[in-house]
Amino acid sequence: MANAGDGKRQVLKQVFGYDCFREGQETLIDAILDNRDALGIMPTGAGKSICYQVPALMKDGIALVISPLISLMKDQVGALLQSGVRAAYLNSSLTPAQHHAALRNARAGIYRMIYVAPERLETPGFQAFAESAPISMVCIDEAHCVSQWGQDFRPSYLGIRPFIESLPRRPAVCAFTATATPEVRADIIDLLGLQNPETVFTGFDRKNLYFEVRQPADKLGTLFLLLREMPDRSGIIYCSTRKNVDTVWEALCGRGYPAARYHAGMPDRERQENQELFLRDERSVMVATNAFGMGIDKSNVSFVIHYNMPKNLENYYQEAGRAGRDGQPASCILLYSGQDVITNQFLIEHGAENEELDEETRLLVQKRDREKLKAMTFYCHTRECLRGYILRYFGENPPPYCGNCGSCNQHYEEADITVDAQKILSLVKRSGERFGVKTVVDTLRGSKSEKIRRLHLDNQSTYGLMADISETRLREMIQFLILEGFLKISEGEYPLLQWGPHASELLSGGRTLAMKLLKQEAPCPVKAARGPEEQAEGDPALFARLRALRKRIADSQAVPAYVVFTDAALQDMCARLPKTPAELLQVSGVGRVKLERYGQPFLEEINRYIQQAAGYPG
Ligand code: ADP
Ligand code: ZN
């Protein structure tokens, strides 16, 4: 077992250049190595690929990865080849001759991993191959495509289960998705035939994303300000209409920004070209309607600015979520105006989207859309934590303060809640740890309800002591005390509030407790909120030079830049300034093969930089 642990960590370091696993990765890898089925529900950028790529490299035989998007497959295989892993893809972009050659190589045992489009599984050539090949595991990416409940239903995904069942020996099957409501999750397990899968759900939170809403009088001016704060960064600006896209794009070009644009009113070829330019970092900014982004797997998008408010939070989170896929800090900023609500309302009342529906259904859909628009609009007005607001909308139970959003930065202050916490803990203990949160809250706030009197809770010394604190805030405090281990919720049939492991520390005195709470006074005027803190220090000038070098190498090999090294890896180089190959290997994202391939030019560039900084002529 110790060996397996060492093995997977070795693969992670040597092939991918990473030191430690992220949340959920190890659990899923262990299950797959153990030949069990696995299901990973993890947000974009969490690192799902590593979960199947590491075991694929440790198991004997060939791993099949079923993936719905040609562009994704190309990127993944390109990235694997760069890391020295033999891999190939089979999809409709190959000529018949290329397809045959790939299958021939596969039969000869040349590849460790094959990416395949679901439609290809049923072709006779592939079936014949699958029957005789030593298939080590089957991985299904974007697994929600199997469900008709989801947005991206792909009928060919229904062929996956029969395909797996037709194999002479059933390999471990693992499935991954970023979006799964309970219905979709049940469909994935059922329709893909997963057998008692090890399931990891890491939640929807994307910790590296910073959220902010601004309501500027002059949107264009604010946009320029924001762009100036993020020079040389790659980002997307979403607008609600084609007209807005054109206006913003022209304004950017007029000021010399390297911007491309994308909307459904443009000729196919131009759209395609612009997308390519953005993916290759020839244009750092893309101005687009929401038609842009499906299947775009550009990892170094470091901001997404919404020039208009989208019609619902589902769309907003999906579009904003295209930032920071590489795990680096990234910003999601929404520029809101009242007009956005009116535009969206108009589209709901008069939109062509639902014309085919019968009258009753259409009214129902309109009603639902209005509710969703309302929730989206509240997001733009709330003073609560923005991340918390989004996560609650998706059914999670986040803490009230995240520390990495516009609201938390502006509207929260640290408050000493030691005395309040003591009152709460005292009541919980003295009343025998026999009551739930609601009863505790009611007692502390001095409720005159029949229940409180019947239970004689109005005789407690803490009864009514917190009457001046709102119910919401009191509940927030209790939640905070639970998170910090001062209280806990019992496990029985009725969830009761009880003392947690640290409770006595607070009552014995000598320790204070601080909590971030929403400021009580009126909202302060919008001040220039700051973006997320940069993780790595390091000279931006060197970063720019390394990026330029990376681009030259990527262009010469006709691959996207981040396939050579990610932005995260370049930033780590700037922070560590490695001088030897061994030191370069310490950089996050540098594995053995990449070191051999690209190490030298990067070390030389860094060395030149150090010499120049020290005053030697370059
Ligand atoms: P997802 O498919 O979940 O959206 P990816 O698999 O594309 O995410 O991974 C996102 C980024 O995180 C990639 O650049 C990947 O190399 C990086 N990554 C994944 N796992 C780790 C790890 N354990 N340590 C550091 N970086 C990681
Ligand atoms: Zn927050």
Image (cartoon, grey):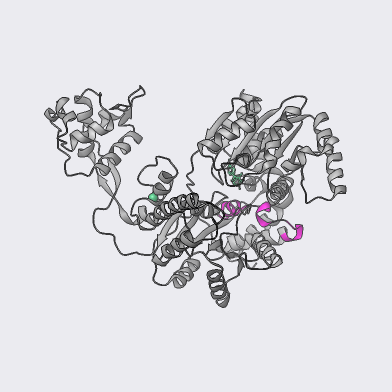
| Along the viewing direction, whichever of 519 and 507 lies nearer the viewer | 519
Q: Is residue 244 left or right of residue 18?
A: left
Instruction: Kindly identify the residue that appears in the image at 40 percent across and 63 percent down.
Output: 214
Let me know if residue 457 is in the magenta part: no
Q: In which quadrant will I find the C terminus?
A: bottom right
Q: Position of residue 216 (x, y in %)?
A: 39, 68
Q: Is residue 562 magenta?
A: yes
Q: Does residue 11 appear in this view?
A: no
Up-down: is 164 above or below 519? above
Q: Position of residue 150 (x, y in %)?
A: 57, 43
Q: Quadrant of residue 13?
A: top right
Q: Residue at x 81, y 39 (%)?
A: 123
Vertical placement of 5 versus 145: above or below? Answer: above
Is residue 168 visible in the rendered structure shown here? yes
Residue found at x 76% / y 46%: 91
507 horizontally vs 370: left or right: left
Q: Nearer the viewer, residue 301 or 389?
A: 389
Is 238 situated above or below 139?
A: below
Q: What range of the chain is rendered magenta? A: 555-574
Query: x and y percent of residue 25 in the render?
Result: 57, 35
Residue 76 falls left or right of residue 198: right
Q: Residue lying at the far front in this picture: please name it.
A: 359
At x 62%, y 64%, the residue is 264
